[in-house]
Image (cartoon, rainbow, N blue to C red):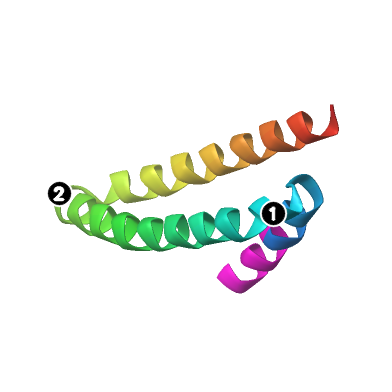
């Protein structure tokens, strides 16, 4: 799933970004993917040991945040 997201992000980035900025933007994106891949499991594990309902709430909120951010980015690139 991460590969598909990365491929979509790369294609979209090539569409909206100037050619000389693509490499830096891709490197930043990969770094942020890794940062999220480290922080989210740790935060989820800590929340799960306290109360397992909060883990699903955190996942739902992060997914909602990602959807809203993506929609905002698409609207900004279309205008």
Q: Residue 28: where, in percent of width, then height?
A: 49, 55
Dominant secondary structure of the residues highlighted in magenta in the image: helix
* Residue that mark 1 sits on: 20
Q: Which residue occupies 22% across, 50% down?
A: 47
Using the image as rendered, state which of residue 59 and residue 21 is in the foreground. Answer: 21
Instruction: Classify residue 48 as left or right of residue 56.
Output: left
Instruction: Classify residue 70 as left or right of residue 45.
Output: right
Vertical relation: 28 (above or below) 74: below
Question: Does residue 73 belong to the magenta stretch?
Answer: no
The residue range painted magenta reads 1-9
Q: First in sequence, mark 1 or 2: give its number.
A: 1
Mark 1 surroundings within 10 Å by alpha-carbon count, few (fewer than 14), some (14 through 19), many (20 or more): few
Question: Does residue 3 belong to the magenta stretch?
Answer: yes
The answer to which image quadrant residue 24 occupies is bottom right
Q: The N terminus lies in which quarter of the figure?
A: bottom right
At numbered mark 2, what does the secondary structure look like: helix, strand or loop?
Answer: helix
Q: Which residue occupies 31% across, 62% down?
A: 38
The answer to whether residue 1 is visible is no
Vertical relation: 76 (above or below) 29: above
* Residue that mark 2 sits on: 50
The answer to whether residue 48 is visible is yes
């Amino acid at each position: 799933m991460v590969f598909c997201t990365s491929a979509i992000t790369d294609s979209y980035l090539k569409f909206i970004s100037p050619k000389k900025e693509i490499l830096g933007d891709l490197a930043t994106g990969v770094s942020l993917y890794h940062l999220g891949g480290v922080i989210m499991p740790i935060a989820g594990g800590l929340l799960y040991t306290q109360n397992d309902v909060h883990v699903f709430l955190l996942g739902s909120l992060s997914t909602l945040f990602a959807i809203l951010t993506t929609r905002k980015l698409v609207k900004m690139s279309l205008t």
